[in-house]
Amino acid sequence: MRVRQHVTDRTHRKTVPVAAPQVSGHRLDDRTARRRDGSAKPGDGRGLRDVQLPTARPRPRLVRRTLQDNVYEYLQDALMAGEFAPGERLTVRGIATAIGTSVMPVREAFRRLTSEGGLEPLSTGATRVPVFDLSKLQDLTEIRLKVEGLAAWRAAHRITPEELATLEHLNAEVLKAAAEDNPTAEARANERFHFCVYRAAQSTELLRIIEHLWLQIGPYLAWLLKQGRWPKSVRGARGFRHHKDILLALRRRDPDQAEAAIRADLMTGAELLLDQARQLPRATPE
């Protein structure tokens, strides 16, 4: 299966679904990147794990003059799609070995992602995906409602017929994945649906802010799905019922309704996520 291709202009990045990760400890070859299944509980502090990249993700295309950017975008995409679980530990050398590059561009990517909140350093020298933090999740939720609502409002003025057709197709992919009980494909398709709306806003700066937010929230949302903590009563057509409202508002070019629909959709996941976070033990500093 082919996976997303990385380009320098991320505002026009396109993606395709990624298969669920498979457990493996072997070195990655040119076609397949392997990772553990990430089934450990968030914040689990038991030892360092070897590199954990999803089975269907190949090595990124490494262009010498943009090597650091390519490695950064590769890891950014994996985090946004929830392919690393909260609390999952990563090592510079492990990632470098997995994708077939030196440690320097990986170390720089870790530095950038840490500064953006996508990763956090540990006192042991390792790096991990941030664990659940209720206060942080509440803060992210409030910001997302404002920022992503604005993007939907702008998209209602600017979206093209071609983008509307793409959104219809992506929503069908979301519903198909949910009906097949495929949480990995469901999370990936939902991400692509939302970013199709946000790209339609035609704002590079706004898109960059939203990517930064998804970089931090993606692991949490995907973890809920993969751990079976997302009740079936709010999955499938019922769980994504607001997508229909988003599409209708965009077709009518109604900015206020588009903003309201995207906010309602975000709250569906946010309320469940916050409820789950309240039930998890507090993370211990390392």
Image (spheres, grey):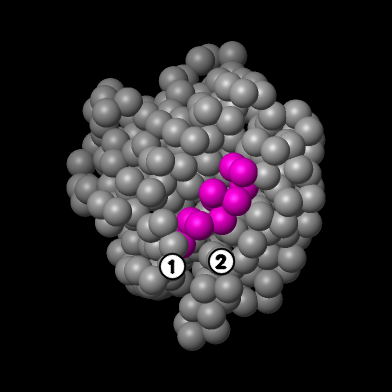
> Which residue position holds label 1?
234
**In this picture, residue 30 sits left or right of residue 12:** left
Q: Which mark is residue 39?
A: none
Q: Secondary structure at mark 1?
A: helix
Q: Are marks 2 and 1 in contact (CB under 8 Å)?
A: yes
Magenta residues, dominant SS class = helix
Q: Residue furthest front?
A: 252
Pointer 2 local density, CA inside 10 Å: few below 14, some 14–19, many at least 20: some
Which residue type does callout 2 highlight? Thr
Confirm whether the magenta stretch covers residue 247: yes
State the image coordinates of residue 73 (x, y, percent, origin top left).
55, 33
**114 left or right of 96 in image:** right
Whether residue 137 is visible here, answered yes or no, is yes
Q: Which residues are magenta?
A: 239-248
Q: Is residue 286 left or right of residue 144?
A: left
280 and 204: which is toward the camera: 204
Q: On the picture, is 145 further left or further right than 87?
A: right
| Residue 38 vertical placement versus 163 (above, below) | below
Residue 82 position in % (x across, y down)? 45, 52
> Is residue 96 highlighted in magenta?
no
Front residue of 279/49: it is 279
Q: Gap between marks 2 and 1, in whole Å?
A: 8 Å
User: Can the viewer see residue 208 in this picture?
Assistant: no
Q: Secondary structure at mark 2?
A: helix
* Front residue of this view, candidates 193 and 29: 193
Instruction: Please give the residue where the numbered disc 2 appears in the rendered image.
Output: 268
Say which residue appears at 51% left-offset and 45% top-offset: 191
User: In what quadrant of the picture does the N terminus appear?
Assistant: top left
Q: Residue at x 54, y 65 (%)?
A: 269
Q: Position of residue 255 (x, y in %)?
A: 78, 44
Residue at image position (73%, 51%) is: 257
